[in-house]
């Protein structure tokens, strides 16, 4: 494997490039108070939810328009200085860390919904619009945007990392739901990819090239997305199981039978305990599935009854239904707060959060062996999974001042990802490669494919200024 676990390799490869004073002066002349070199602002933009510690960027530019982004990138290109796009800082794999120094471009103020086209089921937004903001603004149309990674991330960031989340089993990922983009390239040029049409055979699919590029090819400044009608009926349920294996086998059976379940989340007993403490709930502290069904009232009832019968075959019990929006929100809020519940369960800890995805038929094999390894390590952890599409997440809770704990966590991650790849899976189902899984990308895709990625990167970003040091090394 190409991802070593020796401690020397568990920190990012930091090689700071000099940021010329002339560039800072030029940025301040162009953006005035919207270019900040204050340490507090730089530090805020120099960290994310990963456990890595990296020096902050030299300055932060707060963009308010596509032209702002283009001007900032052009100035940085003229001075061979790295550019790191910043949304809300919810990355888990170090995507926004300034490992080679440079300038952070914060697009959070670019937060307007530009056009809603309910007849075509599309919407165009600026990159700083968050998923919750979008759904609040379009709810009067009877439509919604289903991609839900948990964090209230920006849609630009979600596009850049090819995010997915709890609804992916039914609605897909950002890959399937981004129709078109506006992008500022490494030279400062503004280009558009795709259209609002549902399909196209015109030329290379540049939209898919930028979706998932993690800021290494350009800065996304507009996103056109698919929307969906709000289901006529929605019902959620929780069901406890005697073991993780029983819960997973139940899900596999549901998926293989073709039940169109909208969401199905696995939460292990450790995480249920943490969520109960954090969210003041009284869920049974056993492995649990949290499910949601969308459709007509009759369809939802049929789906739910089928799933309940399957779960009962595997020892599922204590079905609890939530049909009102308030009850569903309470359950899903608790699930989305699982990360923060886990962090609070061990004061002062940091989480090495990792995810992988395998074919649904191999989910039990991958998950159960990984749970056994985590239990044997003695390191506290949490486990949640969008198991309907074979995707699950471990979070290893470590003392950031204890190098041994970091080694244990990284060894667990190494074994987990190696196992997933051996079973025909991927090193990351939705977090992205970032800094943390660069070696694993070679194992998954092969050296030839990664070299092709490098060739694309060099062609589009010859000065290597777009979020350098992420996905692979040049």
Image: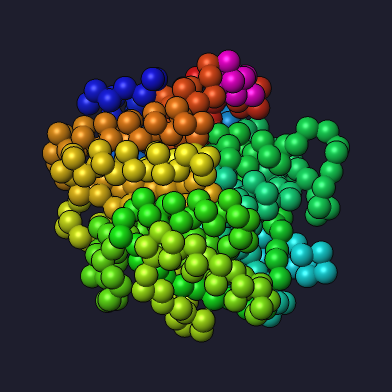
Q: Residue at x 52, y 44 (%)?
A: 360
Q: Dividing the image into 4 quarters, which one contains the N terminus? A: top left
* 335 displayed left or right of 408: right
* 127 displayed left or right of 49: right
Look at the image and give the residue range highlighted in magenta. Answer: 448-456
* 85 displayed left or right of 403: right
Q: Is residue 28 above or below residue 300?
A: above
Q: Give the camera-side residue of 121 and 319.
A: 319
Give the color scheme: rainbow, by chain, secondary structure or one colour.
Answer: rainbow
| Residue 460, position as x, y percentages in the image | 65, 27
Q: Give the camera-side residue of 474 and 392.
A: 392
* 121 displayed left or right of 222: right
Q: Residue at x 82, y 47 (%)?
A: 199
Q: Is residue 125 above or below residue 358?
A: below
In which image quadrant can residue 5 be found?
top left
| Residue 312, position as x, y percentages in the image | 43, 66
Q: Tally the marks.
A: 0
Q: Is 452 in the magenta? A: yes
Magenta-drawn stretch, dominant element (helix, strand or loop): helix
Q: Is residue 446 above or below residue 374?
A: above
Q: Residue at x 81, y 64 (%)?
A: 120
Look at the image and tell me whether residue 36 can be seen. no
| Residue 454, position as x, y percentages in the image | 58, 21
């Amino acid at each position: 494997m190409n991802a070593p676990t020796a401690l020397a390799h568990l920190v990012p490869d930091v090689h700071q490039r000099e940021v010329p004073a002339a560039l800072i002066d030029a940025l301040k002349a162009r953006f005035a108070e919207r270019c900040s070199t204050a340490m507090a602002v730089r530090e805020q933009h120099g960290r994310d939810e990963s456990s890595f510690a990296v020096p902050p960027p030299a300055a932060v530019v707060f963009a308010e328009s596509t032209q702002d982004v283009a001007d900032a990138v052009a100035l940085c290109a003229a001075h061979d200085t790295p550019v790191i796009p910043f949304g809300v800082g919810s990355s888990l794999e170090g995507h926004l860390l300034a490992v080679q120094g440079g300038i952070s471009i914060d697009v959070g103020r670019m937060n307007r919904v530009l056009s809603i086209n309910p007849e075509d089921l599309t919407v165009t937004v600026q990159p700083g619009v968050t998923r919750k903001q979008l759904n609040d603004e379009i709810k009067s149309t009877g439509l919604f945007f289903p991609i839900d990674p948990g964090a209230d991330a920006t849609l630009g960031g979600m596009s850049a990392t090819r995010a997915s989340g709890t609804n992916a089993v039914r609605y897909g990922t950002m890959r399937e739901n981004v129709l078109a983009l506006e992008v500022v390239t490494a030279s400062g040029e503004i280009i558009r990819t795709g259209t609002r049409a549902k399909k196209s055979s015109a030329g290379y699919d540049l939209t898919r090239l930028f979706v998932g590029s993690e800021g290494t090819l350009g800065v996304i400044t507009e996103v056109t997305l698919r929307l969906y009608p709000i289901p006529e009926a929605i019902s959620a349920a929780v069901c406890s199981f005697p073991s993780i294996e029983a819960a997973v086998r139940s899900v596999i059976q549901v998926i293989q039978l073709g039940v169109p379940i909208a969401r199905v989340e696995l939460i292990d007993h450790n995480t249920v305990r943490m969520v109960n403490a954090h969210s003041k709930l009284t869920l049974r502290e056993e492995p649990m599935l949290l499910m949601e069904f969308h459709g007509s009232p009759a369809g939802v009832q049929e789906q739910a009854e089928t799933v309940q019968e399957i779960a009962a075959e595997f020892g599922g019990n204590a079905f609890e239904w939530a049909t009102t929006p308030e009850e569903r929100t309470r359950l899903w809020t608790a699930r989305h707060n699982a990360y923060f519940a886990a962090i609070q369960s061990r004061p002062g800890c940091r989480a090495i959060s990792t995810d992988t995805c395998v074919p649904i038929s191999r989910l039990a094999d991958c998950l159960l062996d990984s749970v056994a390894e985590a239990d044997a390590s003695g390191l506290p952890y949490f486990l949640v999974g969008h198991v309907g599409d074979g995707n699950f997440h471990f979070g290893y809770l470590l003392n950031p001042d204890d190098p041994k704990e970091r080694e244990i966590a990284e060894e667990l991650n190494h074994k987990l990802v190696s196992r997933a790849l051996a079973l025909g899976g991927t090193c990351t189902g939705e977090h992205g490669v970032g800094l943390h899984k660069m070696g694993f990308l070679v194992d998954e895709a092969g050296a030839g494919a990664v070299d092709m990625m490098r060739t694309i990167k060099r062609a589009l970003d010859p000065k290597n200024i777009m979020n350098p040091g992420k996905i692979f090394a040049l």
